Image: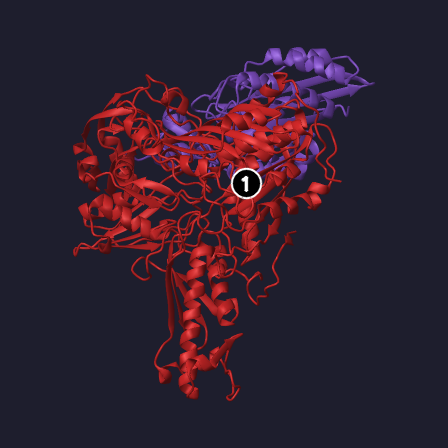
Amino acid sequence: MADSTNGSSRSFRVIGTRPIRHDGIEKVTGQAKYGADYAFPGMLYGKVLRSPHAHARIKAIRTEQAAALPGVQAIITGADFPDIPGTTAMMGELIVNTHYLSLNVMARGKVLYDGHAVAAVAATSPHIAEEALRLIEVDYEPLPPVMTAAAAMKPDAPILLPEIRSKFIAGRTDPGSPEGPDQPTNVAAHIQFQRGDLAAGFREADYVVEREFRTATVHQGYIEPHNAVALYNSDGHATIYCSTQGTFNVRTFTATLLKMAEGDIRVVPAEIGGGFGGKTTVYLEPLAVLLARKSGRPVKMTMNRAEVLRASGPTSGTWIKAKMGAARDGKITAAQFWMAYEAGAFPGSPFAPGAMCCTGPYNIPNLLIDSYDVLVNRPKVAAYRAPGSPSSAFACESLLDELALRCGIDPLEMRILNGAHEGTPQPAGPPYKRIGFIETCAAMKNSAHYRSRLEGSNRGRGVAAGFWFNGGLQSSAAVNLHPDGTLSVVTGSVDIGGSRAAMAMVAAEVLGVAAEDVRPIVADTDSIGHTDVTGGSRITLATGMAVYEAAEDVVRQLKQRAAKLWEKKPEEIEFSNGRLSAIDNGVKPLTLKEIATRLARTGGPISGRATLNAGAVGAVGNAFAVTCVDVEVDPDTGKVKILRCTVAQDVGRAIHPAYVEGQMQGGTAQGIGWALNEEYVYDEHGILRNTGFLDYRMPTCLDLPMIETIVVEVPNPGHPLGVRGVGEVSIVSPMAAVANAIYRAVGVRMTELPMPPPRLLKAMLQDQPRTEELHPVAAD
Amino acid sequence: MPTAEYFAPTELRDALRLLAERGNQITILAGGTDLVPQFNCRELRPHALLYIGKLGLNYIIAKNGGLAVGSATSLEEIATNRLVFERAPVLAQAAAEMGNPTIRNVATIGGNLATASRAADMPPPLLALDAELSLVSERGERVIPIGEFFKRAHKTVRLADELLTEIRIPSVKGQTAFVRHGRRKVFSCCVASVAVRVVMDGGKCADARIVAGSMASTPVRCLGAEGILQGKHLTSELAVEAAAQAVGECKPIDDDRATAWYRRRVIKVLIERAINRASDL
């Protein structure tokens, strides 16, 4: 079902094939161990008491009764946590302030959202721990909740964090402007990108469209809830088993929050049942260590689904005002975006990446983007697949669709006409290196789907594009050659999307063996060099690069061994397709398997290694995707049926095409859920109403058609194999694509996400006048 | 630590004895799809549980041209049973659209009725089929029309010592349809649903049932709308008229799944479609 275009002529033996994943059998037979599967003798069960208020002062916490319950072994509250100064650290794509991270894992002084942790108990059974929670008395003084960016930005809004002052915002982010007044604010940060002359650009436009957009808080919806099992030994060393996207992050954050030495904590990665960015931070890990230290026994903690939805990190709801102008010929002349991202209770929304990606696919000469990080009484957001980009793209791609209609230009043609290419400045300024946006649009334009005719009433076809800059960051890898000629690849990158297979395939390609001859291992934090999170679509790119280099290190060592055996210089040895030979052909070549048996005699075992920093976020391998979706709207109920959906994406080089396609389909499925049904619903007191999957409505497989994929390969010049990150960008464009399709089906421009039947029906009944004739979208 | 007593008798008389002695303290447990999550979240703290899954109440049998269905029969059984498919297809369809396979495998028809959720999926088709319920206690059996069973949301006429043991579906004439609107294709609570039965005689509608679900605190039998169909040739215009009348007979509420405004809009469409479908228009 996958089309492949633009593949370069470089030939590979293993890369581009579809071997069975190395961890597949363990997973389908239920033998793989996830975080909650770990158990130790004497283990206790930890449970968290959570705030029933969205915003309240904690006046007193009394734990005596709970402590007296038989079976209760330890209780912790905010008083057990040290004060952590406010330092910021990069956590994949988002910046983390450790002071606020500490306050998020356990409230002190104030609770700032429904579900905020206020105490935790470890007991001999989960039931006793839950009963003990009921015996903890907390006196709250409720404060008025602030639930949306619009409410939080009002001058008289209740303040969440009094230490956040307006003068820092003005000073930090807008160096040209005079220092603002020094007063408390819920606006934690502001970023601005500008280029050209905005007013002049809008004067040049023949058509200008301006709209206000809103998107709801949405959750990643990973199936496996957060979990942690902690052991604290009497020598002061702690071991944590948990499901996380970043074992080294867990180590750093837990050490920082508990004022322990990083070297005193070992984090062992369990299998992970989904994360999508939501498992790049800590919630339970520091609590479990503290409870284990206090009780002297291992402690297991797991969240239930309601806890995950109330108190882990969804992504921001947003409020966006956007304006875009184009000349009659379709050239965009100017664009302006004002965006507020809800951070939740503490600073750190993806307001900056949202701004960096907003108009990313396009070359817009006159541009002004302002983006704000706004505090609200909701859970602190975490990363979610291309954080920030989907919301700003929803606004940008909706306006672009309107302009295409006004200009009477095919929507993909419009995107190609304005499309970014090598040398085009990104919204943040730096020019793109070689990118494949135009190729991706062209591939979609030539696709069977786009060329097909869509007939029938209340049906429409929409397209939209998305950009994600992708991460580089630090990775380590080791490749070990076994005596039988097989190998192991050891990395610190948790496998969340099939990366074990990709790592094995990269090593197999370099070493001329089969993918099945390489065993990929995900090691704990003491067993491999530092490795940043599995996030930013960076594993196949950056950890893959480390594996590539480590495998080349093995090749170097093999050549030395052969040189020794053959009494030649290493430069005189050649290695290709898994065989060592002499350049002068003077000796009988040796296969990898043959030389593997002679390691002891030639200098001992061979182990290749590599560590690297693949570059700052966005420095390597930017990714673009285009979504095309056909919908049918039920005019009487407002229900949207997805008839057909295709995603085209520039992947650089597909190492394992099946898992690349899986990523593209997965991001698209999540995007369609975000478009149509998913949202956090709070009542007037700021209490979350839909705390389960019954009413937090992600699409099921029956709600979606098979999502078709077009793998575009424009090799990334910054990577030895041409790889670009592929995990995230496919979630960016579906929301606007669906909205654009709805418009073309029923003539209603939806500017608020999600677009569930009641909201769409209401909009359809509000008799929106059409301002332009619909242009047929079928290319031929 | 509070604990709950748990009873799982294998004889009906033992269950009825328990209910006679301590009915007010006892929570009856069948499939548990509604209760167990509430226990787990500590929203409900039962003193004593009476599990009725071992009483032999899992059956579907042909009776007097109709059906007798044990109250502990799973919805999956109802959705796939040949007898139900032949004699009460509207019930099979409603069961098939409820929840998802894992829920249908354990959820029971009796539980779906006795819980008396506003959004329950079994009541509309059963009302459309003129079903009767058998309530049994040590005092004897009483059989009531299902229309008299529901008092308000989560409240039925079942007395503390009674057990709902059987659902009886008489042999009824006519063609039926069930149309349901949820927020997803599967695993979604009902936003609005309707079951319709029309009996045609000489080209005219001799009798009709129109029952709306999720449109009030109990299932709503839309008598006014049924009256509009009575004695007439069924046309799509008449379906529109009946549907408009039916909307006035419903009292929907706003909840997390939809607003009352939306429910009124949607039920009108669903009723039109159901009438058209049942009468092959």
| Residue in the image at 50% along x and 47% along y | A432
Crowd around label 1: few <14 · some 14–19 · many ≥20 (10 Å): many
Q: Colour of chain A?
A: red
| Residue in the image at 28% along x and 30% along y | A168
Camera-side residue: A64 or B159? A64
Quadrant containing the N terminus of chain B is top left
Camera-side residue: A272 or B188? A272
Examine the image and state in which quarter residue A18 appears.
Answer: bottom right
Q: Residue A452 in the image: x percent, y percent?
A: 73, 41
Residue named by callout 1: A361
Residue A329 vs A259, above or below: the answer is above
Pointer 1 chain: A
Whether residue A258 is visible, yes or no, is yes
Q: Colour of chain B?
A: purple
Camera-side residue: A568 or A69? A568
Describe the element under mark 1 as helix, strand or loop: loop
Number of marks drawn = 1
Residue A445 appears left or right of A95:
right
Q: How is the image coloured?
A: by chain
Q: Residue B52 in the image: x percent, y percent?
A: 46, 35
What kind of residue is marked 1? Answer: Pro
